[in-house]
Image (cartoon, rainbow, N blue to C red):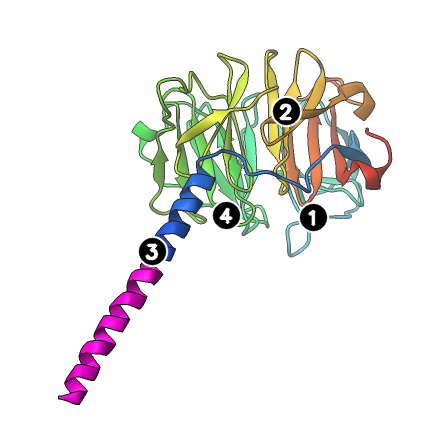
Amino acid sequence: MVRARGSSAGTALARWLLTGVLAGLLSGCAAMIEEASRGPAPSAAAGPVSLMPMASLREGLLTDRLDVTGMPRPAPGMAPVRLVRPVAVAAREGDVYVADAGAGVLYRVDLASQQFVRVLGVRVDEGTRLALGVDRVLHVLDRAARRIVRLSPAGRLLPGLAIDPFDLSQPVDLAADESLGTLMLADGLTRQVLALPPGGGAYRVLALRGDTQLQLGAVERIALGPRHLYLVDPRCACVLFADREGLLLGRLAGSGPGPLSGIAADAQGRVYLADAAAREIRVLVDGRLIQTIAYRSLGLAEVADLRVSAGILWAVDPLGAKLEARRILPRALGGGAK
């Protein structure tokens, strides 16, 4: 009997403890949900930047020799080659690819030696977009053919991604998550984004919906930040941001009114916008404009594509026929704003 009472008392105590634990968990979950719904998280470490020169690439030597990792290597009789009209870039650590619509060629580039190698089997035009996965697989968006071409680091064609044609009516841009490897593919006609896992397989369709006051008119460019997906809407010349499930959360102040030709986001939560009309790169933090950087201060005539990888901002300049790489540093460390 004592045992039974002890058991009954223990059960009551256990129930009391469990109730307290559950209440605490529910309170914590509610706080996290409320925090997530507020939009971009405050970025105390993110402020104005200095973009320090790292590389400015216009020309190099063309080789047909690769090492075991697919990087260009010296070969007899290498000929000089110049960029004609580059339109897209993808970079991750030492891997750098440039799509040159003027030459109709995709190049892999060794920045240290400034050697180029042609990547075969890929069509390049003004609409070409590039993204590198965590597995170093290159994804090339062929907008005309409505498909994604995948290439191994050695330049071999890999099996394509199995995507329902109804989900891919008018692909316009793609971006890769540098930590998780998820590939985001935006469709301009359906105004949705496909979230594809690394290596292919079952994918999710993000419908990009918000409340009645927040709707996406169209999508032209996308970028991935630490917590959010950013979408350039050409109809309002503005940027909307959504969570990773496609729920639209808000519109970035300072993202209009001119046409935006490029967008990128860094690991600290800064968003970089290329304003084609003002000829400047805008830097936003927590939805606020904190800095403008004139193209001319970076030696750029125009910008067709922006990417950020491993603390480096990559800018493609079709008019100047060049690829510019700048190290992102806090302004205090990098000196004056560039």
Alpha-carbon neighbours of circle 4 within 10 Å: few (<14), some, or many (≥20)? some
Q: Name the residue under label 1.
A: 94
Tell me if residue 281 can be seen: yes
Which dot, 4 or 3, sits closer to the camera? 3
Q: Name the residue located 55 percent from the left edge and 24 percent from the top edge.
A: 252
Residue range (magenta): 1-23
The residue labelled by disc 2 is 273
Between 255 and 2, which is closer to the camera in this rendering? Answer: 2
User: Along the polypeptide, which appears first: circle 3 or circle 1?
Assistant: 3
- Mark 4 is on which residue type? Gly
Is residue 16 found inside the magenta-colored segment of the image?
Answer: yes
Residue 232 versus residue 72: which sits nearer the camera?
232
Mark 1 and mark 3 in contact (Cβ < 8 Å)? no
- What amino acid does circle 1 point to? Gly
Measure how far apart labels 2 and 4 are at the Cα level: 23 Å
Choose top left, top right, bottom left or bottom right for residue 114.
top right
